[in-house]
Image (cartoon, rainbow, N blue to C red):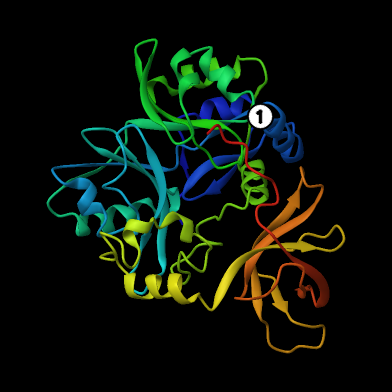
Amino acid sequence: MDDPIPLPLDGLHAELGGRMVPFAGYSMPVQYPAGVMAEHLHTRAKAGLFDVSHMGQVVVRGDGAAAALETLVPVDVAGLAEGRQRYGVLTFPDGGVADDLMVANRGDHLLLVVNGAMKHLDLEILRKGLPDHSVEMLEDRALLALQGPSAEGALAALVPGAAGMRFMDVATFDWEGATLWISRSGYTGEDGFEISVPVERIDAFARALLAQEGVMPIGLGARDSLRLEAGMPLYGQDLTAGITPVEAGLGWAIQKVRRAGGDRAGGFPGADRILAELAEGPRRIRVGLRPEGRAPMRAGVMLYESVEATAPCGTVTSGGFGPTVGAPVAMGYVPIGTAVGSVLYGDLRGRRLPVTIAELPFYQPRYRR
């Protein structure tokens, strides 16, 4: 196995005491000396700074790029206004999810932010599916996420115009001669921003943010517990090639214009299956899970209808302790129609322990609309 690739902020992570682990082929901080619990709660209360430079930033250029991209995603890209972005998925011909992503209309090009572990496959899919367009993975920009109720004030101290942005706005700003691409979005359930920065300026900009009152560096551990509480799926666990966006509860991300009867219905990989599931319902669905007691149920735990049942009826795909909730939380797949409040049993090291089907999210997001 190849050694993990260091991120541009590797030196800063070491200076801050980050405990580094391999993730998506990169060396990334899983936590800092404060610990995952403190980092999670600090982000909910103030502001956390995340290095997400492992993620792919892909620029698509050319006439009709938005319409062309709609042949690969079940998303209304053509109707996306300049200066706005939305969430979407790349799909396979059988309806499974190849990756989830953000797509932004930046005027003369589209900017896609894709998952680090999948970015090279995504690039292949995009280049094969968009042969008449320029598709470029940017290697000269890093990416930070600043999340939490104090994020606006901290960023506005450096970039005053950012305070006027709404949720899912994208804009370009200057900071001491560096061109920043900023979106008001994130992966924590909190208000916040994702900031694309030239690699040569990322260290200075990250230090400037960390110097703001209330900003703490946050690692992968808290990033995972924050998104789990907010009910957000993780590709490779809650989303895979074997799971459709409808099964994943992402029907809301398929706009009316791309659905049956819409002006631009279908035309994307897996459309027949995905549109049928939207109309008739899938056979299984992603749900929230609340294990009893204090023991978390993590990815891979099988779910059963009873203590005596021999065949599983579902599986946990993400799980851990929710610091804000104060209890274990999880997500997984169960048969469609399994009612909220129903009790299933997770097989935890040979013991069948009760787990209750719950509404998602566990923590209500606080975005600036």
Q: How many marks?
A: 1
Residue labelled with disc 1: 17
Report the residue at 68% width, 82% height from top: 312
**Residue 362: x percent and y percent?**
70, 51
Side of 2 where 152 appears, left or right = right
Visible residue check, residue 305: yes
The 10 Å Cα crowd at callout 1, few under 14, some 14 to 19, many 20 or more, is few
Q: Residue furthest right?
A: 293
Q: Residue furthest front?
A: 261
**Residue 217: x percent and y percent?**
62, 28
Side of 204 where 223 appears, left or right = right
Side of 66 where 10 appears, left or right = right
Q: Nearer the viewer, residue 205 or 233?
A: 233
Report the residue at 73% width, 80% height from top: 304
Asked if 311 appears above or below 360 in the picture, the reply is: below
What's the amino acid at mark 1? Gly
Report the residue at 79% width, 83% height from top: 306
Q: Nearer the viewer, residue 165 or 102?
A: 165
Q: Secondary structure at mark 1?
A: loop
